[in-house]
Amino acid sequence: MKRILVTGSGGSASFNFIDSLRIAPEKFYIVGVDVKPYHAELAPVDKRYLIPPASDPDFIPTLNRIIEKEKVEFVHAQPDVEVMVLSKNRDKIKAKVFLPEHSILETFANKMKYNRLLKKNRVSAPESYHITSKETLKVALDKLLKKHEKVWIRAIRGAGSKASLPVKKLSLAKEWIEYWIDTRALKYEDFMASEFLPGREFAFQSLWNKGKLLTSQARERIEYIFGHLTPSGQTSSPSVAKTVNRDDVNETATRAVKAVAPEATGVFCVDMKEDKNGRVCVIEVNAGRFYTTSNFFSRAGLNMPHLLVKMAYGEKLPKLAKYNALPENLHWVRMIDSGFKLVKNGEWTSEEI
């Protein structure tokens, strides 16, 4: 039986990664670790431990003590900050990790730097500008609002649409950034301004080995968890999503990964959205960890977390579809306190009268 440690086990992304392993055709001994005891109680793991934050010097030593005590063979992280620390210290960890090169993770983590690389490699991406001051903010908005109805203000680093807001005027953009400066200790240079992309939003989850795409599936985000309560209207975590099989989405996502990682190995998740002309543009790539709803595809028959574990152990994978591994229009519906449901072939149970 494989013995695996999952960090951030109290979070939804780690919960769904673990859920995927629990429905796999083999048994796992899973150790869950988290910085807080509360939500870790909900994780379907065999053993739970509290650990210090990833920023704490004792983070890696604590993990190693748990690894030795529980005879852990493989460590997987879902929170971005823990992915980065594990990657940077991979040679110090007393168990397997299966991550892209650290320089690749660093490039993807900086959304502005990555946007420039996309442009350089002629991969479609939103027109974007790095903000460094009030003056550069004005210049960026003057340029963008001449061509676009709205501008998307966001933090260069961070997950969950951090510090994101669509704006139509300079004053609101300035106030929004200064709110984050005053309350969250960010700086002007932590922000970027991009053209607002009004079209459909896609998420492409994929597994790679030495530059070869092994399998992938795209989905469309339709509604968001508590999206109606956020200023931006979205949270990047969908309450409703459906599988989509589109050549332009698949091709754009593949080029988005190869622009930075020609020898890509591991899991790569590409966020994309259509511009006003319907062109698919790359927003960002999250590498080294899965999307929050990884168990959507797992429950539908494409268990990528299990496949990743097999890769980490050097095991042979079954024959896989490179693209469109699942049928179109499979819906995944989830909500806080309501669980989740996979709906096939539009078989909704609500009736009209």
Image: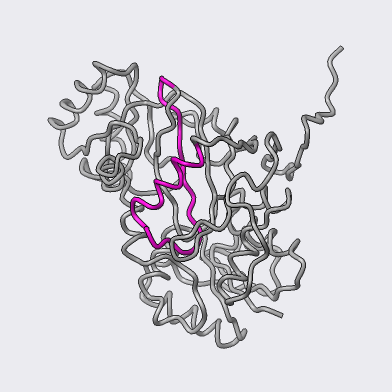
* Residue range corresponding to the magenta coloring: 249-277
Q: Position of residue 63 (x, y in %)?
A: 49, 78
Q: Write the residue at 38% across / 35% down.
A: 164
Q: Write the residue at 55% across / 87% down.
A: 68
User: In the rendered image of this protein, does residue 326 appear above or below residue 347?
Assistant: below
Q: Position of residue 142 (x, y in %)?
A: 19, 21
User: In the rendered image of this protein, does residue 334 appear above or below residue 68?
Assistant: above
Q: Position of residue 236 (x, y in %)?
A: 51, 40
Of residues 78 and 318, the one nearer the viewer is: 318
Q: Is residue 267 rendered magenta in the image?
A: yes
Q: Is residue 281 left or right of residue 43?
A: left
Q: Position of residue 338 (x, y in %)?
A: 74, 42
Name which quarter of the figure residue 352 lies in: top right
Of residues 160 and 248, the one nearer the viewer is: 248
Residue positioned most to the left: 135
User: In the rendered image of this protein, does residue 7 appear above or below residue 68?
Assistant: above
Of residues 353 and 96, the one nearer the viewer is: 96
Quarter of the image containing the C terminus? top right
